[in-house]
Image: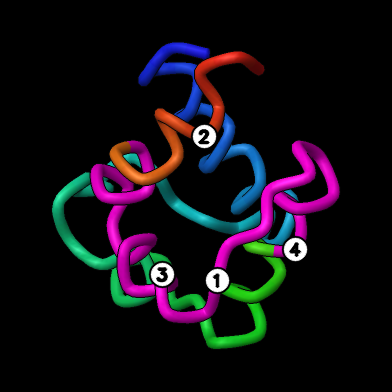
Amino acid sequence: MTRNDIKDLILEIIEDIDDEADFDSLDPDQPLRDQLDLDSMDFLDIVMELRKRYKLQIPEEDYPQLATLTSCTNYLEPLLKEA
């Protein structure tokens, strides 16, 4: 899976959670929660969807690494390289 595939995957999951999410002005280096008004349950839904789709176990201590679109991509890239 390429970096662009991973970015698209994250945005697709967010859109499934919040179909009103506005990605037009999304800054990939700013926290997703602030930009898209995601709450902690939305964030957990993203983690659970990654687990469901790709059998990824993301430890709670790694959650801060999923704060921005760029950091999500950096974190997930080695885990999804074979996907």
Separation (CA) of disc 1 from disc 2: 13 Å
Q: Nearer the viewer, residue 54 or 46?
A: 54
Q: Which residue is mark 1?
A: 59
When the figure is inspected, residue 50 is found, relative to residue 80, above or below; the finding is below
When the figure is inspected, residue 41 is found, relative to residue 38, above or below; the finding is below
Q: Nearer the viewer, residue 78 or 72?
A: 78
Q: Are marks 3 and 1 in contact (CB under 8 Å)?
A: yes
Residue 27 percent coordinates (x, y): 18, 48
Residue 48 badge: 4
Residue 14 percent coordinates (x, y): 60, 53
Dot 1: what SS? loop
Please tell me which residue is depicted at 81% across the width and 39% down the height of the picture: 53
In terms of image quadrants, where is residue 35? Answer: bottom left
Looking at the rendering, the stretch of residues picked out in magenta corresponds to 48-73
Q: Which residue is mark 3?
A: 62
**Along the polypeptide, which appears first: circle 1 or circle 2?**
1
Q: Is residue 67 magenta?
A: yes
**Along the polypeptide, which appears first: circle 3 or circle 4?**
4
Please tell me which residue is depicted at 60% across the width and 14% down the height of the picture: 82
Dot 4: what SS? helix
**Along the polypeptide, which appears first: circle 4 or circle 2?**
4
Dot 2: what SS? helix
Give the overall secondary structure of the magenta segment: helix
Separation (CA) of disc 3 from disc 2: 13 Å
How many C-alpha atoms fall within 10 Å of the one at disc 1: few (<14), some, or many (≥20)? few
What amino acid type should be assigned to the residue bearing mark 3? Asp
Residue 34 percent coordinates (x, y): 30, 76
Q: Which residue is mark 2?
A: 79
How many C-alpha atoms fall within 10 Å of the one at disc 4: few (<14), some, or many (≥20)? some
